[in-house]
Amino acid sequence: MKLRVLMLVILLLPGASRAQDTNYWNLQYGTRGELLGGVVVGSALDMSATFYNPGSVAFVENPSFILTASVFGMQTLKLLDQEKEEGALSTTNFGPLPSMFAGVLPMKWFGGRTAYSFLTRQQLDFRIAAREGLVVGRDEPGDTLSIGGEIMLTENMGENWGGFTWAKQIGERLGLGATLYGVYRGQYTNARQTVEALNGNGFGASFVAEDEIDFYDVRTLGKLGAYMDLGRGSVGVSFTTPSASLFGSGKVVYNRSVIGDADGDGIDDSEAQVSFAEDLDTEYNSPFSIAFGGAYQFKRLKGHLSVEYFGAVDEYTVIESPAAATSPGVTGAEVRYANAATSVVNWGIGVEQGFGEANSMYVSFITDQSSYQAVDGKRIVVSTWDINHLSGGVALAIRGAELTLGGGFAWGKNKAVAEVNPGTDILPATVTPGAVGYTRLKFIVGFGL
């Protein structure tokens, strides 16, 4: 059981490092956006508005203001509902979280303001190797089974957005804008699992399972936004189009091999299922969304509110590999990696309290619902848990510059859906724990000129 649980935890690890592949509000941008949890659809008045609401870019008072924020996260993934004597298995990693860079362009088209932005929506660079061995008793007295297991997991993934924004102020209170993004997603995953077993009668077997995916996909999407200044308050709405996949390519390596006597009956059970192909077409889709937000000033206290609806994405094939040619003992396998998403609604509130001449304190709470949906093929996503985020900090004016210090805590859990499936009697076919718990501590340091 210890070996099986170890294998399962390692298979779940990408969910903790991936910046959540089924959550849309897990990342925030800009110094104020970080402290307010991204609850700025109706109040983004810095260059993070290129992402949150392009319409408010027209109202940014100092558009040359360059935002820089260093954000670090410590994420923990824990396997829950285990036997108490076994102890809860968990993994923790620490590193920088994705960020954003934005600024204005000198040209003015159709009387409006133009800007550029680059941001990372997802990022992962992860490798782990582990080996465990144990001896377990069999049903018959005196019979034992020696088991050795090895896991090697390497994953590198990044999704970057680059866009151009056009925004124009209409009259004194209304701003309209749009951002056109080009999106590049690259993902490499190699998961290898080896299990070796030898029983007391001298029979044994080894099982090898390897999945390797290496692909990139280029797509495009747009954001439309409207912002209205109401004096003591403001409101905004933004619409994100579904993405359109332009082109991509990738390869798949799939291997399931058993060598030896897997069930101890003295008969050789050796067999293999394989697939290998390169230059495969790829597709990666994201949904449309519509967000509403607003803010209101109460003397030195300002409240912020945002709500966003994300549409569903029907199941589609990300990459598919045809069956390899068969040979004695080898069967070709068709392998399909798929994705899908359910519709979700996220909401958040934030409070900004001014103090001193130009200083502010912030606190915010947001929900981050998972859009996970089961698919018929092999899935490329891991995380399935809904997350809550609590953030806060201060922005201090120091000699014409702004220093931002803050942090956040995120937590959530859900039923685990990953499984270990060797397909032999060496280990049980499916191992599923009760739940997986997720936590993240975030540290924010920002500096603006």
Image (tube, rainbow, N blue to C red):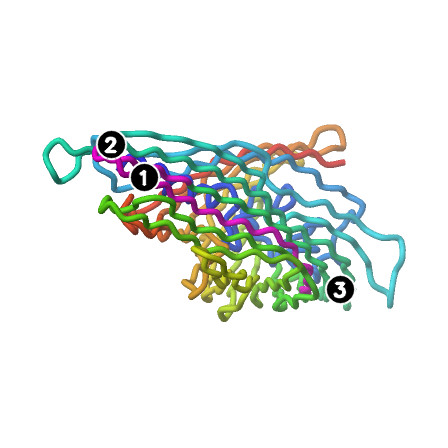
Question: What is the CA distance from the residue labelled 1 to the residue labelled 3?
Answer: 62 Å
Q: Quickly name the residue at label 2.
A: 86
Mark count: 3
Q: Is residue 42 above or below residue 69?
A: below
Q: Is residue 218 magenta?
A: yes
Q: Secondary structure at mark 3?
A: loop
Horizontal and vertical percent position of residue 326: 50, 61
Residue count near mark 3 (Cα–Cα under 10 Å), binned few <14, some 14–19, many ≥20: few
Type of amino acid under label 1: Val
Chain part drawn in magenta:
194-223
User: Which label is found at residue 5?
Assistant: 1
309 horizontally vs 187: left or right: left
Type of amino acid under label 3: Glu
The structure residue drawn at horizontal position 56% and vertical position 42%, both measured from the top left corner, is 35
Mark whose residue sits in front, 1 or 3 = 1
Q: Is residue 100 magenta?
A: no
Residue count near mark 2 (Cα–Cα under 10 Å), binned few <14, some 14–19, many ≥20: few
Mark whose residue sits in front, 1 or 2 = 1
Q: Quickly name the residue at label 3.
A: 172
The structure residue drawn at horizontal position 54% and vertical position 66%, both measured from the top left corner, is 317
Q: Is residue 272 above or below residue 34?
A: below
Type of amino acid under label 2: Glu
The structure residue drawn at horizontal position 25% and vertical position 34%, both measured from the top left corner, is 202
For the question of whether residue 174 can be seen, the reply is: yes
| Mark positioned earlier in the residue sequence (1 or 3) | 1
